[in-house]
Image (tube, coloured by chain):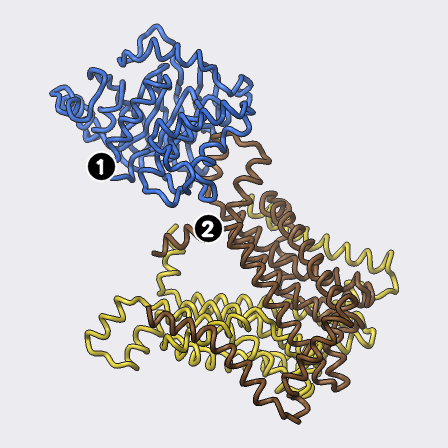
Chain colours: A brown, B yellow, C blue
């Protein structure tokens, strides 16, 4: 009991201590690369909370959310078709595997050349790059649905819609969720990359611009914001996943103990 | 047999159709635009293979990715074992690791470029940073997962700390480390490309950036094709290595018996 | 698929009628037409040199309201037979028919309880929702649907576990969920594939009695595949004995034991031992 308390204390205390140490050590820093934390936070507040919230922060987040949502919808839908229609699977399989090999960020220059530097380019880049992890996981998930469950569906004469929505989708759910989590990471990375590669708006663009003009505190503020977004997006996903897949989490925990 | 043949034909047809569509768009509706025809891209690809600069870029990419990965593996496993072996340390680092883990290295790219400049070291550090965290987290999980009964047995036989580490803890953490390496190897390649593309580090990423900035579209596409193949090779190799090295482990035996 | 044009939702009145004239528990009379008729059924996997004949020339019938067990050495192709009967796999030659209609797809009046309960239940649905799943497309009035589910869960003694997930239950309880799912579907014919193979002995007895009770209460025709001879004798009106490699019918043995059957008194009857020996010697006899 006592030991547990100490461990909890350590868990919460260490990050606070680290931040405090950063604050203290950097307080009188004159190093251009590592400005005082106080200054960074000041710039953070000035930049993101007021001036550029609507123009840049919201813009980036909207691209991320919209692109990611479309990518997962298309990925799951296309995954179902690919997994269940053999001809489609045979035709698309080599292409899907080739595209998954390309580093997602390397596609951004191609989209820039095709569509330019606008918001459409950023959105298309996010959608296409984030599509593949979900697509591949969906195909794998549906292909590995237990044959007994298919037999059960057949014996009880479930309709086509019931089979897809009530059997295949939940059975493949855990794998689809794992793919979607990777897609979220990719969407986030490509959001930053597409902004850094030539856009003038968005958090990524602002951060790189700050770096190029040696406004180190602004750059740090950008890094801090991106870090918080990356962490927050993943945490939201985990929360949603644990809620939707509560049955899976529960059965796994039971199987382990 | 018949089915396999049909499947093969459909697959070949799929690839042919995709290439034909590309060629059609590039020579028809978008002729002269930023989309080069397949023929031009393939010709450029062949040209690249005869070009020394391409091979240097490829070698740079591979060296940075592999060196960063190797350093991350060593540091990650050592740190992971240390953190996993002492409960207070594990708790103290938990929140920090959990916070940092979902943050991709591209986030700190501006800072790293600022400190190192567009150099090999910059790319290398980014790869290291991007790969080391998942390896630490997985190693900690693996060490923590070591069977308590086996540990007690080892202790009751009077094995020393280092012996227990080498004979019980590390082997039982191996599958976790293996998984981390399988995920990290393709990631190392991706990060190297990102570092080149956005930070100007040497390698294929920088080549792509230069091709795009210079409007040299056939070269841009040829490089992306090369990266696609390289990415597949990295994924394939890391999966193969994991299976080869860990075939003895229970989690692999389970897979074999359905 | 053309066998299934008739109404899948059964006529409850019709079912009770069947109970009335068939629960006397004896071998099917010659007057009633066979409910399920298997004629010269064969199943071969693969073709050419790799062809493997699993079932050869199988013929037997099951009458309305009967409990028939199929016994045979393990690995004899019993599961393959059931898949053919359930319309999950086409037969290579010969036919299986319900009321004279050849089975070409899952028949609407049939339900199947699978051997592997842990894989035949949906782990993402609660017990109640598992039972409800096959009923949704029957478009029953809500009240009737709920009543069917409640009745089925009560019949298997799981009313208290309705809101739990299958993986929270023991193996025997999971198999009872699978049985409840079949019951709520109100099939006229219930087929069970080694339904009690992987539960402990005590649960096994309970489930066997549950099976007999279902026949009494719902008037179903029940076909059970098992490798346990005692179980076959205890449950059946008739036992179909299969020989192995490829599976074919060695004999059909009428079981003449008084009803109602009871785990202790029935099993201690001298007739029980006799019937058991008959079946066993049939199986052990070199082909």
Asked if residue C37 is positioned above or below residue B27 in the image, the reply reads above
Q: In the image shown, does B234 or A140 lie closer to the viewer?
A: A140
State the mark number for residue A248.
2
Which residue is rendered at x = 29% and y = 40% of the image?
C198
Image coordinates of residue C79 in percent, x first then y, are 37, 34
How much space separates mark 2 and mark 1, taking CA atoms?
Answer: 30 Å
Asked if residue C82 is positioned above or below residue A141 in the image, the reply reads above
Q: Chain of mark 2?
A: A
Q: In the image shown, does B232 or C229 lie closer to the viewer?
A: C229
Q: In the image shown, does B96 or B243 lie closer to the viewer?
A: B96
Q: Is residue B42 left or right of residue C281?
A: right
Q: Secondary structure at mark 2?
A: helix
Q: Secondary structure at mark 1?
A: helix
Pair 2/1: label in front: 2
Residue B35 in view: no
State the mark number for residue B18.
none
Image coordinates of residue B247 in percent, x first then y, are 38, 65
| Within-10-Å neighbours for mark 2: few <14, some 14–19, many 20+ | many
Tag 2 near tag 1, CB within 8 Å: no
Q: Going by the picture, which residue comes out furthest to the left?
A: C270
Which residue is rendered at x = 30% and y = 22% of the image?
C213
Asked if residue A103 is positioned above or below residue C273 in the image, the reply reads below
- Locate residue A234: give its quadrant: bottom right
Which residue is rendered at x = 59% and y = 68% of the image?
A231
| Within-10-Å neighbours for mark 1: few <14, some 14–19, many 20+ | few
Q: Chain of mark 1?
A: C
Which residue is rendered at x = 60% and y = 89% of the image?
A26
Residue C276 in view: yes
State the mark number for residue C201.
1
Image coordinates of residue C67 in percent, x first then y, are 31, 20
Are tags 2 and 1 found on a single chain?
Answer: no
Image coordinates of residue C124 in percent, x first then y, are 47, 44
């Amino acid at each position: 009991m006592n030991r547990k308390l100490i461990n909890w204390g350590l868990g919460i205390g260490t990050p606070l201590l680290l931040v405090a140490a950063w604050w203290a050590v950097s307080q009188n820093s004159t190093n251009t690369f590592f400005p005082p934390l106080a200054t960074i936070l000041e710039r953070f507040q000035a930049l993101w909370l007021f001036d550029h919230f609507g123009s840049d922060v919201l813009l980036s987040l909207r691209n991320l959310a919209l692109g990611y949502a479309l990518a997962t919808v298309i990925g799951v839908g296309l995954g179902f078709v690919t997994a269940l229609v053999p001809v489609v699977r045979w035709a698309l399989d080599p292409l899907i595997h080739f595209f998954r090999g390309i580093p997602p960020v390397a596609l951004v220059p191609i989209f820039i050349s095709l569509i330019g530097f606008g918001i459409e380019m950023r959105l298309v880049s996010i959608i296409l790059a984030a599509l593949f992890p979900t697509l591949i996981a969906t195909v794998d998930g549906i292909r590995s649905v237990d044959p007994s469950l298919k037999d059960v569906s057949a014996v009880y004469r479930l309709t086509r819609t019931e089979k897809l929505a009530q059997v295949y989708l939940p059975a493949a759910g855990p794998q689809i969720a794992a793919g979607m989590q990777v897609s979220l990471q990719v969407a986030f990375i490509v959001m930053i990359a597409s902004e850094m590669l030539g856009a003038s708006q968005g958090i990524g663009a602002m951060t790189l611009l700050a770096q190029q003009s040696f406004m180190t505190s602004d750059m740090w503020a950008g890094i801090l914001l991106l870090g918080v977004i990356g962490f927050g997006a993943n945490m939201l996903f985990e929360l949603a996943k644990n809620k939707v897949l509560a049955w899976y989490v529960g059965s796994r925990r039971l199987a382990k103990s | 047999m018949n089915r396999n043949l049909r499947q093969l034909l459909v697959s070949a047809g799929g690839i042919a159709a995709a290439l034909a569509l590309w060629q059609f768009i590039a020579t028809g509706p978008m002729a002269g635009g930023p989309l080069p025809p397949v023929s031009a891209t393939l010709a450029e690809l062949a040209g690249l293979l005869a070009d020394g600069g391409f091979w240097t870029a490829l070698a740079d990419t591979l060296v940075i990715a592999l060196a960063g990965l190797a350093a991350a593996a060593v540091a990650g496993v050592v740190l992971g074992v240390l953190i996993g072996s002492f409960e207070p340390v594990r708790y103290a680092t938990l929140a920090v690791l959990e916070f940092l883990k979902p943050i991709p290295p591209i986030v700190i790219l501006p800072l790293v470029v600022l400190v190192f400049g567009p150099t090999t070291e910059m790319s290398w550090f980014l790869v290291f940073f991007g790969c080391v965290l998942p390896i630490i987290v997985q190693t900690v999980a693996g060490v923590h997962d070591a069977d308590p009964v086996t540990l007690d047995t080892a202790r009751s036989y009077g094995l020393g700390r280092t012996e227990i580490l080498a004979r019980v803890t590390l082997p039982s953490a191996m599958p976790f480390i293996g998984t981390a390496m399988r995920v990290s190897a393709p990631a190392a390649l991706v990060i190297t490309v990102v570092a080149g593309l956005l930070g100007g580090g040497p390698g294929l990423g920088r080549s792509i950036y230069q091709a795009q900035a210079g409007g040299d579209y056939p070269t841009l596409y040829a490089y992306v094709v090369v990266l696609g193949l390289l990415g597949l090779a990295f994924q394939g190799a890391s999966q193969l290595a994991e299976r080869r090295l860990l075939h003895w482990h229970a989690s692999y035996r389970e897979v074999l018996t359905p | 698929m053309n066998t299934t044009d008739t109404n899948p939702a059964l006529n409850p009145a019709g079912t009770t009628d069947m109970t009335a004239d068939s629960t006397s528990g004896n071998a099917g009379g010659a007057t009633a037409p066979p409910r399920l008729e298997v004629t010269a059924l064969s199943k071969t996997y693969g073709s050419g040199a790799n062809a493997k004949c699993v079932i050869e020339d199988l013929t037997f019938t099951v009458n309305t309201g009967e409990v028939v067990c199929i016994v045979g050495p393990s690995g004899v192709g019993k599961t393959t037979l059931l898949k053919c009967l359930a319309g999950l796999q086409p037969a290579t030659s010969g036919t299986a028919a319900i009321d004279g209609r050849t089975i070409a797809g899952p028949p609407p009046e049939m339900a199947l309880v699978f051997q592997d309960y842990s894989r035949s239940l949906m782990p993402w649905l609660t017990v109640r929702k598992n039972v409800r799943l096959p009923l949704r497309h029957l478009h029953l009035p809500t009240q009737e649907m709920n009543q069917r589910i409640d009745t089925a869960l009560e019949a298997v003694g799981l009313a208290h576990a309705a809101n739990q997930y299958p993986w929270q239950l023991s193996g025997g309880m999971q198999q009872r969920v699978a049985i409840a799912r079949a019951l709520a579907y109100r099939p006229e014919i219930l087929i069970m594939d080694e339904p009690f193979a992987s539960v402990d002995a005590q649960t096994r007895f309970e489930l066997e009695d549950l099976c007999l009770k279902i026949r009494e209460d719902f008037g179903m025709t029940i076909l059970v595949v098992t490798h346990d001879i005692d179980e076959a004798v205890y449950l059946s009106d008739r036992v179909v004995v299969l020989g192995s490699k490829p599976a074919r019918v060695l004999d059909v043995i009428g079981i003449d034991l008084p009803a109602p059957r009871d785990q202790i008194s029935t099993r201690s009857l001298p007739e029980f031992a006799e019937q058991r020996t008959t079946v066993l010697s049939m199986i052990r006899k070199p082909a």
